[in-house]
Image: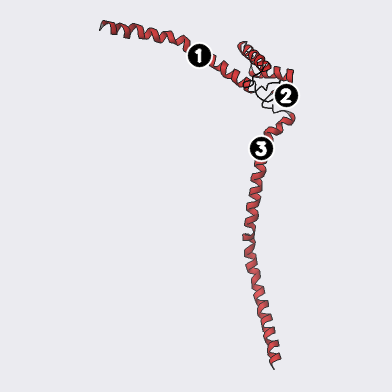
Amino acid sequence: MGVWRFLRVIVVPFAVLATLPAAAWAQAAEPDAALIRDIENNLIAPCCWTSPISEHQSEVADEMRAEVRAMVAQGKSRDYILSRYVDEYGERVLATPRAKGVNTLAYAAPWAALLLGALGLLLLRRRRRAPATTAAPAANAAQPEESLVRRYASVIEKELGEMDE
């Protein structure tokens, strides 16, 4: 039993303490990995302009991935890194356009279309309800028509009676 107690008291806590630096290092490296992945997904490979550098297999994409990793290791921000590539290749290098100038339409147009669609549905709903509200005055207008029908019916009856005579 002395061996089990030794293992439980000395070895297990030592093993736990030995893994703490590795866990802390993994947590510290994880934000960098997420940042690198985000930047690589937002940069289009300039060799053919078809896919992000995170997926593209070319020399240029490999160089850009290495540069991104080096800049993140130096502590450069996401915006700085993206701006550097925009300066070098132009706005086309970004997978998602920045909301400036004409690019603002890419962000505003869907919301404007949604609002216009909602407004159109509201107007259509009101227009479909409108006949129901105008039907009530039509019922009141039917009363003078009934008196006209009675009057004309009496005139027709009178003329038919004269024709029979």
Mark 3 and mark 2 lie on one chain; the one further toward the N terminus is 2
Q: Position of residue 85 (x, y in %)?
A: 70, 18
Q: Earlier in the sequence, mark 3 or mark 1?
A: 1
Residue 86 got which mark? none
The answer to which image quadrant residue 61 occupies is top right
**In the rendered structure, which amino acid carries the disc numbered 2?**
Glu
Q: Nearer the viewer, residue 43 or 141?
A: 43
**At x 47% / y 13%, what residue is drawn?**
23
How would you rate the neighbour count of disc 3 (Cα within 10 Å): few for under 14, some for 14-19, many for 20 or more?
A: few
Residue at position x 69%, y 37% in the image: 109
Q: Helix or strand or loop: what does disc 2 sit on?
A: helix
How far apart are labels 2 and 1 at the CA level? 34 Å
Which amino acid does the dot numbered 3 rest on?
Pro
Residue matched to label 1:
26
Circle 3 or circle 2, nearest the eye: 2
For label 2, the crowd category at 10 Å Cα-Cα, with few meaning under 14, some 14 to 19 and many 20 or more, is some
The answer to whether 1 is drawn above or below residue 153 in the figure is above
- Could you tell me how far apart the alpha carbons at marks 3 and 1 are, in whole angstroms? 40 Å
Residue type highlighted by circle 1: Ala
The single residue placed furthest to the front in the displayed view is 58
The number of callouts visible is 3
For label 3, the residue is 110
The first of marks 2 and 1 along the sequence is 1
Q: CA distance from mark 3 to mark 2?
A: 21 Å
Task: Choose top left, top right, bottom left or bottom right for residue 54.
Answer: top right
Q: Residue shown at 72%/28% (left/top)?
A: 100
Residue in front for this viewpoint, 1 or 56: 56
Residue 60, horizontal then vertical, whole percent: 68, 16
Which residue is labeled 2 in the image? Answer: 91
Q: Is residue 2 left or right of residue 129?
A: left
